[in-house]
Amino acid sequence: MTEDSARCPLLVLWDVDHTLIENSGVSKETYAAAFGLLTGREAELRARTDGRTDPVIMADLVERHGLTVTAEYQERFGEVLAAALSSRADRLREVGFALPGAREAIAALSAQEGVIQSVVTGNIRANAFTKVATFDLHHGLDFEVGGYGSDDHIRANLVGIARERASAKYGVRLDAGNTVVIGDTPRDVQAGRLGGAYVVAVASGSDSIERLRAEEPDVVLPDLADTAAVVAAVMAARQVAGS
């Protein structure tokens, strides 16, 4: 790694659910409540999430209830999702929690020269912020330059969107060589790969290290508890870029 590569900007994009925080089922409750606000009906089925974007999850839930996903419904997805989670912020704080090491990892990376941190998530922007800020993890994360489910229904595209936003705001050149995605699901790994990023997979969700490794991320960690290991995994992206 050259001296120039050691100083080059690095965009670190965190997944939210099961990577930074555990929502303990509040997300599923939120989708059900949003469905009720949207349709005036009680949800009879549970939302299928699995790393999808919020609009895709809501459209799937509407269709599985035998309803048509109209343009009006699509336009209101963000509104009802934000309202549903906002009304459950206290419950999220009560039953959810920041995952071990998340706060320390964000702080440690913030101390690294040239590192910009944000999120890339299937959540709409408002809900991503609510989830992270509920556990006081928003310090060090720039939500203006993130990639959100409200930006594109294809997760891989969110990486490029975040990269473009960060490049424009900070006036730096960001590309595949200096973008890092950190997530806990195979979909996160796939999105990072397709979005042209260095990928750190964390087995802090329901997927095992072996399952994540099968998607060929650059690094797999068991969790975020070892701050030094997290920082080393992320900063290794610069070594790859500078090699």
Image (cartoon, rainbow, N blue to C red):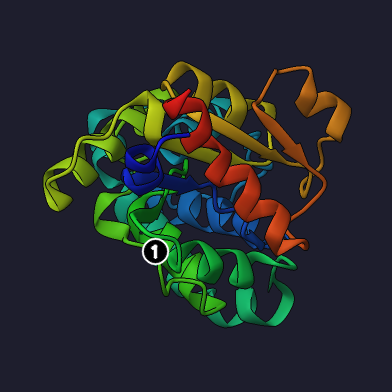
- Residue 76 in percent (x, y) is at 28, 46
Residue 4: horizontal and vertical position, in percent?
Answer: 32, 40
Out of 29 and 156, give the one closest to the viewer.
156
**In this rendering, is residue 240 above or below 13?**
above
The image quadrant that residue 47 belongs to is top right
240 over 167 or under it: above or below: above
Label 1 SS? loop
Label tally: 1
Q: Residues within 10 Å of mark 1 (few under 14, many from 20)?
A: many
* Residue found at the far front of this picture: 3
Q: Position of residue 56 (x, y in %)?
A: 46, 30
Q: Residue at x 44, y 66 (%)?
A: 110
Residue position marked by numbered label 1 in the rendering: 141
In this picture, residue 226 sits left or right of residue 177? right
Residue 158: name its quadrant: top left
Residue 171 on image: x %, y %: 12, 46
Q: Amino acid at mark 1?
A: Leu
The answer to whether one can see residue 128 in this image is: yes
> At x 41% / y 45%, what residue is drawn?
6
Position of residue 77 relative to residue 187, above or below, is below
75 above or below 69? Answer: below
Side of 55 relative to 94 (left or right) = left
Please give the name of the residue rendered at 77% of the width and 50% of the height, measured from the top-left corner: 204
Residue 67 visible in rendering: no
Q: Is residue 236 left or right of residue 195?
A: right
**33 or 53: which is nearer to us?**
53
Q: Residue at x 38, y 49 (%)?
A: 124
